[in-house]
Amino acid sequence: MTKQRKLIHQIICMSPMHLSAEEIYFEAKKLCPSIAVGTVYRNLNLMAEEGQIMKIEFPGQPVRFDKNTIPHEHFFCTDCGQLFDLNIKGIKELIEAQSGMTVQGYSLSVRCQCQNCNTAKSAV
Amino acid sequence: MTKQRKLIHQIICMSPMHLSAEEIYFEAKKLCPSIAVGTVYRNLNLMAEEGQIMKIEFPGQPVRFDKNTIPHEHFFCTDCGQLFDLNIKGIKELIEAQSGMTVQGYSLSVRCQCQNCNTAKSAV
DNA sequence: TTAGGATTAGGAATTGTTCCTGTTTTTATT
DNA sequence: AATAAAAACAGGAACAATTCCTAATCCTAA
């Protein structure tokens, strides 16, 4: 746990959003101007492997990171472009029941409208 | 439907695998050496938009293309590294029932062992 | 207190993809 | 068939996200 890794971890834990490596890098730079991009990427991947944070891979977007390491899904609001948490149960079971295979892992990326954007549009 | 686009389309339709843009480019180059990378990408994206082919976006991998335009999922064999088709019904319904939102689209990427690799390993 | 290993900063290199420019090809119109 | 406009092309530069490399720095433990 070096100074840099601790800082990166704190940035992820403090943020209410799901930050990309680039965003984390810029945040880290504010508090530790000497930090390098490579350091951010290496520590992010290390911490993700060790299970301290979670990688979010959303099609067509840079990888993001989540403090919540309990497996869960994400959806992308097609209006505001933000990424939100989603908790869907039974996906693995559904896949295994229909395919007969043993699922090692999966990633489910959903596109829809978030609550905020939905009510905002309904009001118009 | 230019000569180049037809060629790209045929390559996708002929291949039993899910080719990446780069692989398609190299295949195309064999039959039409003057073809340019940009042409391949432009035509792939155009055809995907028009619904003639389908884009497969798998986390951590280059985009691939599928002749099968009927919505379906894919799984990545953690042994041989190949991508295979998967048909899982009821995903959208599961998401909507548990989230209360209207799903515009989703992408499900599964990691497991394919039939081939599974039996090969069991035999050992 | 010093050698060894781990980690860093800085930047070059890679990968996958898009964009730009000038040229060629196609299409429609006469 | 001639030609003007539109579309598509080749070639390569540019771009974004990420990894890799090297030399310098920082721990750590003997």
Image: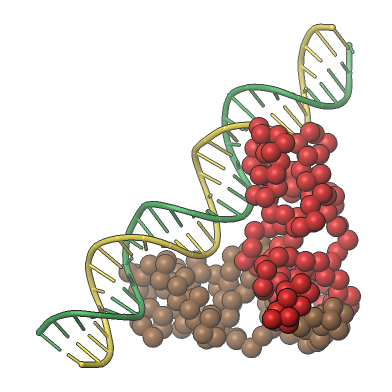
Chain colours: A brown, B red, C green, D yellow
The image quadrant where one finds the C terminus of chain A is bottom right
Q: Position of residue C11 (x, y in %)?
A: 34, 55
Q: Is residue A119 above or below residue C28?
A: below
Name the residue: 46% across, 83% down: A10
Q: How many marks?
A: 0
Q: Kindly indicate the quadrant of the structure image that contains residue D9.
A: top right
Seen as rendered, the residue at the extreme front is B124
The residue lying toward the viewer, choosing from D20 and A78, is D20
Is D2 placed left or right of A47 in the picture? right
The residue lying toward the viewer, choosing from B82 and A92, is B82
The residue lying toward the viewer, choosing from B51 and A50, is A50
Q: Kindly indicate the quadrant of the structure image that contains residue B37.
A: top right
Name the residue: 78% across, 46% down: B11
Is residue A41 at least partly visible in the picture?
yes
Is residue B99 at least partly visible in the picture?
no
Q: Is residue B17 above or below residue A30?
A: above
Is A98 placed left or right of B17 in the picture? right
Q: Position of residue A99 (x, y in %)?
A: 84, 78
Name the residue: 67% across, 44% down: B25
Q: Is residue B66 above or below residue B92?
A: above
The image quadrant where one finds the N terminus of chain A is bottom left
Q: Kindly indicate the quadrant of the structure image that contains residue D4.
A: top right
Q: Position of residue B85 (x, y in %)?
A: 81, 66
